[in-house]
């Protein structure tokens, strides 16, 4: 999965300030959610793909970005088609893919360190309310890191289930994954605590 | 100096309280101290008390006179900690960003932070991996990077919890040599008895108690002689 990875580059998108990209992502996300209908969803997907290609991802990486959420998107689409019809299915899947693509463009073109600085700077007005901007930024950084790390754990869990001949068993793939994700979160918390981050 | 003053750890279980570590008193003043013993004996718990990852149920732990329970923030600035599995410790996408994360407290500007992170990586021979994803690094490189991230803030004490356990022979030797050559006071939890024997002092922990304590070579020899007779321990970490 490409979301959460940064690829250094010199495209216009890479050179844009992180704050501008973050604001644009939030705005696009809002528009995608507010504007209803399958046509607007398909337009949003096309726009997300175009941005990803513009960011220099290339066709192979772009396909990789979509592949990561394709299973979830197809399940969602199937459910929506069954419950509410094809128009809702296209809209739901389209909105999901568009949001993932736009978020991928942000992480692909922006170093996490720059994002952390931007977020810490933008939320400093909350300091009088007792909010620590560095903590907010750290939480954001951890969230970005958690996405590929969770995918990695899911792949390992899948391989472990296959090794035991349990590849068709949903509990054999899901239960260990949940336990490992929680354990990883605990270990990460310990590691941050040990490094004095968030103190 | 690290002082354990009757520091013990108990955890609640279904049948009551389980004693993980009996009240222990130690003064660790040596440059390199090894904690050895069987799995589940309480070594890691003892080590985790040093920077507040574990909390004593009784007694006190002090680092340079600072009580870990009440002055944890100051203690953690003095005590670095590395884990057996560096994967959980590396929280940023690339090597340089992970080291830079440690430096956020001391370097306000990103360019300065990046330069300092690259300097730290160079010290560990990792400069060429600066922009590589941490997921693509080998086990040895990850452990080295985890060490770099912790040592970037120049702590005066480093606690390393089984840092060589997941590594192959060459990487284990490289990390071991690096740890023993550090200027920081080192508290090393290890099953590598050759490495432990090279420390100044060793503490043998079995069944949640200190079973032997003294010059590393003597304690390691004692452990080698008696290890086969020890009762397998419970889950004390």
Image: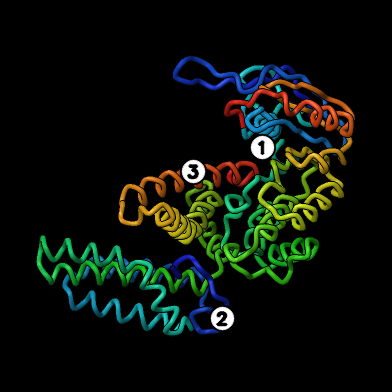
In the image, B33 versus B39, the foreground residue is B39
Q: Position of residue B172 (x, y in %)?
A: 75, 52
Q: Position of residue B63 (x, y in %)?
A: 77, 31
Q: CA distance from mark 1 to mark 3?
A: 24 Å
In the image, B141 versus A56, the foreground residue is B141
Q: Which residue is mark 3?
A: A183
Question: Within the image, what quadrant is residue B111 found in?
Answer: bottom right
Q: Which residue is mark 2?
A: A9
Provide the secondary structure element on which disc 2 rests.
loop
For residue A6, side relative to residue B98 (left or right): left
Please give the chain letter of the residue carrying mark 2.
Answer: A
Please give the chain letter of the residue carrying mark 1.
Answer: B
Q: Which residue is mark 1?
A: B73
Measured along the vertical axis of the image, is residue A42 above or below residue B25? below
For residue B72, side relative to residue A154 (left or right): right
Residue drawn at the location 37% of the way across and 45% of the way down: A175
Q: Nearer the viewer, mark 1 or mark 3?
A: 3
Provide the secondary structure element on which disc 3 rests.
helix
Measured along the vertical axis of the image, is residue A13 above or below residue B25? below
Q: Are marks 1 and 3 in contact (CB under 8 Å)?
A: no
Residue drawn at the location 71% of the way across and 36% of the way down: B75
For residue A187, side relative to residue B104 (left or right): left
Q: Position of residue A12 (x, y in %)?
A: 50, 84
In the image, A5 versus B211, the foreground residue is B211
In the image, B126 versus B188, the foreground residue is B188
Q: Is residue A122 visible?
A: no
Q: Is residue A52 visible?
A: yes
**Label 2 packing within 10 angstroms: few (<14), some (14-19), many (20+):** some
Residue drawn at the location 48% of the way across and 65% of the way down: A4
Looking at the rendered structure, whether the residues under marks 1 and 3 are on a common chain is answered as no
Q: Mark 2 or mark 3: which comes first in sequence?
A: 2
């Amino acid at each position: 999965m490409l979301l959460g990875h940064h690829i250094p580059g010199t495209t216009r998108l890479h050179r844009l300030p992180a704050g501008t990209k973050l604001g644009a992502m939030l705005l696009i996300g809002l528009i995608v959610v507010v504007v209803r209908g399958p046509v607007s969803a398909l337009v949003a997907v096309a726009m997300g793909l175009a941005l990803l290609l513009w960011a220099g991802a290339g066709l192979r990486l772009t396909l990789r970005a979509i592949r990561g959420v394709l299973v979830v998107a197809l399940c969602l689409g199937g459910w929506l088609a069954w419950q509410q019809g094809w128009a809702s299915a296209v809209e739901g899947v389209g909105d999901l893919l568009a949001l993932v693509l736009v978020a991928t463009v942000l992480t692909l073109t922006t170093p996490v360190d720059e994002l952390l600085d931007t977020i810490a700077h933008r939320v400093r007005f909350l300091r009088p309310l007792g909010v620590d901007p560095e903590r907010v930024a750290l939480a954001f950084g951890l969230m970005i890191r958690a996405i590929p790390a969770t995918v990695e754990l899911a792949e390992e869990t899948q391989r472990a289930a296959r090794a035991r001949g349990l590849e068709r068993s949903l509990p054999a793939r899901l239960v260990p994954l949940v336990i490992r994700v929680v354990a990883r979160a605990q270990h990460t918390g310990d590691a941050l605590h040990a490094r004095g981050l968030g103190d | 100096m690290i002082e354990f003053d009757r520091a013990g750890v108990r955890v609640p279980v279904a049948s009551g309280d389980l004693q993980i570590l009996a009240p222990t008193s130690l003064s660790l003043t040596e440059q390199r101290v090894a904690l050895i013993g069987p799995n589940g004996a309480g070594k890691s718990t003892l080590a985790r008390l040093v920077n507040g990852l574990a909390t004593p149920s009784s007694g006190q732990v002090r680092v340079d006179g600072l009580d870990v329970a009440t002055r944890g923030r100051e203690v953690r600035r003095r005590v670095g900690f590395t884990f057996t599995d560096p994967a959980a410790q590396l929280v940023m996408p690339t090597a340089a960003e992970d080291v830079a994360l440690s430096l956020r407290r001391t370097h306000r500007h990103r360019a300065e932070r990046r330069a300092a992170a690259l300097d730290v990586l160079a010290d560990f021979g990792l400069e060429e991996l600066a922009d590589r994803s941490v997921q693509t690094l080998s086990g040895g490189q990850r452990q080295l990077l985890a060490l770099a991230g912790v040592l970037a803030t120049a702590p005066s004490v480093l606690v390393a919890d089984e840092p060589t356990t997941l590594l192959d022979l060459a990487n284990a030797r490289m990390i071991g040599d690096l740890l023993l050559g550090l200027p920081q006071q080192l508290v090393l939890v290890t099953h590598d008895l050759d490495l432990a024997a090279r420390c100044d002092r060793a503490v043998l922990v079995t069944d949640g108690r200190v079973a032997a304590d003294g010059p590393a070579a003597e304690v390691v020899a004692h452990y080698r002689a008696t290890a086969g007779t020890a009762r397998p321990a419970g889950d004390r970490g």
